[in-house]
């Protein structure tokens, strides 16, 4: 696989895997902090991947897989100068432990194309099986994230309804979700746009339905967050 400066996304058509994304290169790979509606499995075949999560810098070396739970804010950072080969697999949120974790891969692959979807699902099941997963839809964090993502209510009004000042509400959201309320809503809208594009919606339609001012606005944020443009993502 030749070096590339963007992520290459593809759908598998296999139940249990939403999509795959691959990247090969060295140096700058940093993207804006974001989260996914799906659980992300990061398979590092060569080099390393580094993330900023919960205030800590975590490096995933070659021969290991990282498990990033759905909804967990993470900031991908620049890779080392060594050639890095990485495959991301996005699987349903039900495959989600409560914390970020790293696991050694028992088998090593040379290219991302040599890993079958079935092998990815085996890795996902193996990591998920090591922790009893208990999802509470009534947790304060879940209610806060759902409320912000699903409501068009102004931040100030939402804060007042909860008996907080706007500043106090913002501090609470940053403490619970990792980013300020408006930034969280933008990320939620980006995930919605990504889902619409994956379902075949034209870019302009996805931009409008996800609440972006126009297609160029979506394109600018999409590239900085997911490492490719909506046009390339839509065609893959």
Image (cartoon, helix red, strand yellow):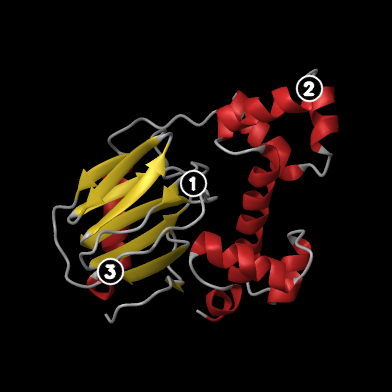
Q: Is residue 188 left or right of residue 61?
A: right
Query: Alpha-carbon distance for marks 3 and 2?
Result: 51 Å
Q: In the rendered view of the protein, which quadrant contains the N terminus?
A: bottom left
Q: Residue at x 20, y 65 (%)?
A: 82
Q: Position of residue 215 (x, y in %)?
A: 72, 72
Q: Are marks 1 and 3 in contact (CB under 8 Å)?
A: no
- The disc placed on residue 93 is 1
Decide: few, some or many residues near mark 1? Use Cα within 10 Å; few <14, some 14-19, many ≥20. Answer: some
Residue at the spot 26% in from the left edge and 67% down from the top edge: 85
Query: Where in the figure is residue 17, as x and y percent of width and height?
Result: 43, 61
The local crowd at label 2, few if under 14, some if 14 to 19, many if 20 or more residues have their Cα within 10 Å, is: some
Q: On residue 48, which mark appears?
A: none
Of 16 and 48, nearer the camera is 48
Q: Position of residue 221 (x, y in %)?
A: 62, 62
Between 91 and 203, the one nearer to me in the picture: 203
Residue 103, relative to residue 218: is it above or below? Answer: above
Which circle, 3 or 2, is nearer the viewer?
Answer: 2
How many numbered badges does the structure rendering display?
A: 3
Give the SS element for disc 1: loop
Element carrying mark 2: loop
> x, y percentage for residue 34?
53, 50
Q: Which sits earlier in the primary sequence, circle 1 or circle 3? A: 1
Look at 70% across and 67% down and name the residue there: 217
**In the rendered structure, are the residues bearing label 3 and label 2 in contact, judged by CB atoms less than 8 Å apart?**
no
Query: Looking at this view, is 106 or 84 the one in front?
Result: 84
- Residue labelled with disc 3: 116
> Image point 48% across, 62% down: which residue?
18
Secondary structure at badge 3 equals: loop
Q: Which residue is identified by label 2? A: 165
3D distance between C-alphas at marks 2 and 1: 33 Å
């Amino acid at each position: 696989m030749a070096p590339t400066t963007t992520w290459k996304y593809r759908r598998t058509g296999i139940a249990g895997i939403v999509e795959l994304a691959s990247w090969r290169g060295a140096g700058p790979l940093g993207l804006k902090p974001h989260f996914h509606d799906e659980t992300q499995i990061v398979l590092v075949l060569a080099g390393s991947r580094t993330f900023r999560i919960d205030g800590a810098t975590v490096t995933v070396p070659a021969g290991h897989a990282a498990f990033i739970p759905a909804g967990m804010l993470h900031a991908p950072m620049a890779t080392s100068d060594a050639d890095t080969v990485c495959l991301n697999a996005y699987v349903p949120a039900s495959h989600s432990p409560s914390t970020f974790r790293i696991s050694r891969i028992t088998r090593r692959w040379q290219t991302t194309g040599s890993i079958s979807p079935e092998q990815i699902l085996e890795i996902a099941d193996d990591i998920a099986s090591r922790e009893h997963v208990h999802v509470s839809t009534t947790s304060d964090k879940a209610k806060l994230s759902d409320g912000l993502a699903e409501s068009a209510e102004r931040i100030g009004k939402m804060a007042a309804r909860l008996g907080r000042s706007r500043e106090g509400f913002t501090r609470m959201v940053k403490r619970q979700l990792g980013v300020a309320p408006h930034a969280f809503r933008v990320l939620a809208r980006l995930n919605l746009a990504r889902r619409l594009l994956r379902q075949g919606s034209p870019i302009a339609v996805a931009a409008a339905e996800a609440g972006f001012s126009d297609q160029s606005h979506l394109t600018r944020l999409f590239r900085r967050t997911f490492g490719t443009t909506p046009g390339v993502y839509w065609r893959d």
